[in-house]
Image (cartoon, rainbow, N blue to C red):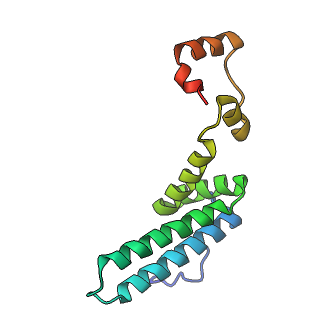
């Protein structure tokens, strides 16, 4: 687009709200800076430094998503899925998985606002057939 003289144009992002876009931009800037810094490192340096900087960047990603409210986290997941930003999608989805871990079915339903579609009899049957799914 820039090559075609459209640098001043508007890019429509219908599935991305401003709050999520701010987080995406922060993530992209941090990763671009890290990539630039890694490319300036002497070729003679050990891969240990590279691994340490990668781990530090992953920790920064975790802290970024940890600081989000539940609604902001869900909006971010929708945005990065739409924008195909795999690293941030992985970090955000891991945060949701950590939120679910150790929760009962009822707690998980409440967390996500999910109403059960089963009658009490159907749910009891499921509990008997698959008790592992209801363990806490």
**Residue 41 is at least partly visible in this image:** yes
Quarter location, residue 49: bottom left
Viewer-nearest residue: 14 or 85 = 85
**Residue 11 is at least partly visible in this image:** no
Viewer-nearest residue: 8 or 99 = 99
Question: Whole-percent x and y of residue 77?
Answer: 59, 55
Q: Residue at x 53, y 24 (%)?
A: 132
Q: Residue at x 70, y 30 (%)?
A: 106
Q: Where does the C terminus fall, quadrant-wise? A: top right
In the rendered image, the residue lying farthest to the left is: 44
Question: Whole-percent x and y of residue 24?
Answer: 59, 68
Q: Is 12 left, or right, of 54 in this rendering?
A: right
Question: Whole-percent x and y of residue 71?
Answer: 72, 53
Viewer-nearest residue: 83 or 115 = 115
How many numbered tags mark residues here? 0
Q: Residue at x 72, y 29 (%)?
A: 115
Q: Is 12 left, or right, of 50 in this rendering?
A: right
Q: Residue at x 69, y 60 (%)?
A: 68
Establish if 10 lies above or below 68. below
Quarter location, residue 26: bottom right
Question: Whole-percent x and y of residue 18?
Answer: 70, 67
């Amino acid at each position: 687009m820039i090559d075609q003289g459209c640098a001043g144009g508007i890019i429509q992002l219908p599935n991305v709200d401003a709050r999520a876009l701010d987080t995406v931009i922060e993530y992209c800037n941090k990763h671009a800076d890290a990539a630039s810094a890694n490319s300036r490192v002497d070729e003679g340096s050990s891969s240990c430094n590279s691994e340490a900087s990668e781990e530090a960047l992953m920790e920064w990603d975790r802290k970024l998503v940890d600081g989000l409210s539940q609604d902001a986290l869900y909006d971010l997941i929708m945005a990065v899925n739409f924008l195909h930003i795999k690293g941030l999608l992985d970090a955000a989805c891991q945060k949701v998985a950590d939120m679910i871990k150790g929760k009962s079915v009822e707690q998980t339903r409440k967390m996500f606002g999910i109403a059960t579609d089963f009658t009490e009899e159907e749910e009891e049957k499921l509990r008997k057939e698959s008790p592992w799914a209801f363990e806490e």
